[in-house]
Image: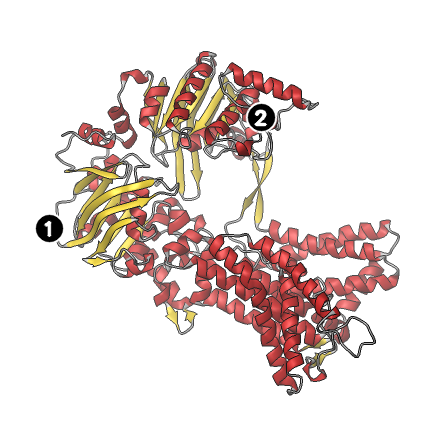
Amino acid sequence: MASSDADYAVWLRGIEKQFPGVIACAGADLRVRPGTIHALLGENGAGKTTMANVLAGVYRPDGGEVWVNGRRRFFQSPADAIQAGVGMVYQEFRLVPTLTVAENIVLGAAPRLLRGAEIEQRVAELSAAYGLAADPARPVWQLSMGERQRVEILKALWRNASVLVMDEPTAVLTPGEAAELGVTLRAMAAEGRSVVYISHKLDQVVAFCDEATVLRRGKTVATVDDLDDVDLQELAEMMVGSSQGVAMDRPPPVDTGSEVLRLQGIHAVGDRGLPALTGIDLTVRSGEIVGIVGVSGNGQKELAEVISGLREPTEGQVSVKGQDVTAASSSDRYRLGLAYVPEDRLGMGLAPKMSVVDNSVVRSYRSQRRGLFLSTAKCTEFCRGLVERFGVRVGRLNDPIAGLSGGNLQRLLLGRELAGRPSVLVAAQPSRGLDVQGVAAIHGHLIDQRADGVGVLLISEDLDELLALSDRLLVMFEGRIMGEYGPDVTPRTILGAAMAGNPPR
Amino acid sequence: MRKPALVRRDRVLPATQALGFFVGIVVALLLGAVLLIVSDHSPAEVYERMFDSALRGTDSLSRTLGRATPLALTGLSVAVAGSMGLWNIGAEGQMMAGAIVATGVAMMADGLSGPLLIALMMAAGVAGGMLLMLGPALARSHLRVSEIITTLMLVYVAIRVVEWLETGPWKDPDSFGFAVIEPVPEQAALPSLFGRANIGMLIALGLLIVFSVAVSRTAWGYELRLAGSSPDTARYAGVSLRRKVLVALILSGGIAGLAGAVQLTGSATRLESGLSNGYGFAGIIVAALALMRPSGVAVAAFVFGAVQVGGQSIQTLGVSSAIADILQAMILFGALVAVVLFNYRIRWTGPAREQQADERLGSAITQEAADV
């Protein structure tokens, strides 16, 4: 076994990693040959960052093996990984703003005697060797994001990393800086170093990388030995899934009724202040499931937040059952019949440190009052009702919710949202990170709601899920709806093209 | 190869926490005994004196309760902000602000009867504390300015204001040239319950109960806990974070201001720059010991009060004040560390294969890592 392992710079074998409520990796593999730039692809939550953190010694895997340059490794800390030649450049840079470039680079890996001028000299030589222009004497706070990233790369090179892991490296870069990064990475690969390049910007992946591994739901679903052989559409399909295995009984169509949700000309900006939604029009009728398809980061998160009342649109109108709710708060919208299962279930949907009871009344506590007080009896009864009706497996109702498994968390969250008998349900990534049973339960509930005349807007990055459940599919790309497709009649290639921004005419 | 790692427990029973508190104090006392032996004192004698002076008999108990009263109020003040994840570091200053406004009211209305004057002064104390907190609270809720810095800095402003009042506008003309403010009217002194424990203790206890119930049993408290533990979830539930932050901080300031008024009418005779006497800063430790829960503040304040009284008493045995201070600090530190540590358990981590092997063999045999 060892002889063939030696061929790989990195071999992550059957990596398993679970977090409270989420299965991040379920036996994923990653093999990287020396001297290549290897793209690690997948949607948000597919397990990319977890894999990178396992390789960089930040997480210890629950199962599986880590091999670096032909040796099995048991990293206890990032320091161990650095020792073994693995350097990581995080999305959020980890530099000390008040120190100079040279000081940051040698921090923690400096020769015993610090001689400022000499170190600056050696850093300057290193940066010249890789074409990474960086003035060693400048304090880091003065640098642009692109320059800071160069410092991070130099940090890894200073520690003589043979494997460089980069998490979404171009997210903070201008297009020009991104192109320069490509040149640098090529130079490193030419020296025999390997780069693991995490991204879901497919055009850059195709431009920069040699080979690719695609993760989905914590597993490796495809490996591409030569990226020249595939095009953008094929990659997009691999990411959102094209296996025919999970054929589900498509629910028979239900008579759709009146319009329950309408968005008109919605514009909104994202967290970074850049436009995220640019003119969204859509409607959902009672008794249908409308699926939103797209590669993540194309405005899906902002769309869900605008509809649920957590993000103010800069333009446009949201109405629920014909009533304009654009100015209404999240709780007012819930009372009007708009339920929302947020993507971030343990950060927004539920409060992990609070009890099962406290979490089940997040939407309804105002009606569980008795005089000034919140009635413990009423709340507990309400919670018990949810737990029974939605088959949530819990220990004690007064224990913190963080101890529940992902499937049970999502059952409780969905149950709580449905308890108000909504007319519209917005569900964002409702089955992400769940085990098979959990996924089946959530899908079952969505289908039941549709049969009961609820209009469901399902936002997902899993094409299989969307194709199995949706009555209509809307493809989102760069904050716009590229087109509407029928799930039964549309070939995946056409969906893939629309997701990549080229809807067929 | 296996290393210990701390893992947070999902659930901590109150009994476990009480045990932690107790264990921490015992460990600290044992370590303190070493310190005492090294400094040539008899631990048994010193600890007996501490116990006697702080806890044995009504007189000792009243002393401890007298100390615990302002500590409970400042502790509650810090805990109310703390339950929202906010840090009121400036209870010391808000105490002063409360005492200033209460003194002003007493000067204007010293003809009133005792109970009425006391009630007015308490209200003035609350108002003073709130007033000093208004700036930091608005800056935090609307501009995201760290309340830690602003509340702390205002402590010194409040103390300087008292110094200015002492030497300037409020200087007592009958003080033979000393820079002191005239004493509060006699009828405004808080009635004693027994010994040095006065009505202020009941005020503190009442407030602790009100806040414990409000935080754990009302919709208002539910929103506060939700916003404190998961701000995004609170936003999702339609709670205005801005308003919650503002209200929690203003209330926190008001409670600390009340502590100032209680101290002024309880154990002090007049407003002076040493009135707050570190109670505001000690309130941070009390709140930390109580894990930011109002319900735990009473116990923490009582223990802190007892440790302070006991620590002072042993100086009559010839224990130097430095050693006495170290001893007090060790006891509080021990309790604090233990209370926090009992929220965790130790998990031994090592390479996955070794762990499995260990479990299979049921032994502590460790295999060399496979990369050798």
Q: Is residue A210 above or below residue A174?
A: above
Q: Which residue is mark 2?
A: A105
Chain assignment, label 1: A
Residue at image position (37%, 54%) is B236
Residue at image position (29%, 34%) is A295
Q: Secondary structure at mark 2?
A: helix
Residue closer to the observer: B175 or B277: B175
Residue at image position (12%, 46%) is A253
Q: Is residue A62 above or below residue A105?
A: below
User: Which tag, 2 or 1, sits closer to the chain's start?
Assistant: 2
Badge 1 crowding class, 10 Å Cα cut-off, few under 14, some 14 to 19, many 20 or more, is few
Q: Is residue B22 above or below residue A220?
A: below
Same chain for mark 2 and mark 1? The answer is: yes
Asked whether, in this view, residue A23 is left or right of residue A445, the answer is right
Residue A249: x %, y % from top left: 17, 40
Type of amino acid under label 1:
Asp
Residue A347: x %, y % from top left: 41, 48
Query: Can you say which quadrant of the picture contains the N terminus of chain A?
Result: top left
Residue closer to the observer: A120 or A31: A120
Q: Secondary structure at mark 1?
A: loop
Q: Which residue is mark 1?
A: A255
Query: Can you say which quadrant of the picture contains the C terminus of chain A?
Result: top left
Type of amino acid under label 2:
Ile
Residue A174: x %, y % from top left: 39, 29
Residue A223: x %, y % from top left: 33, 21
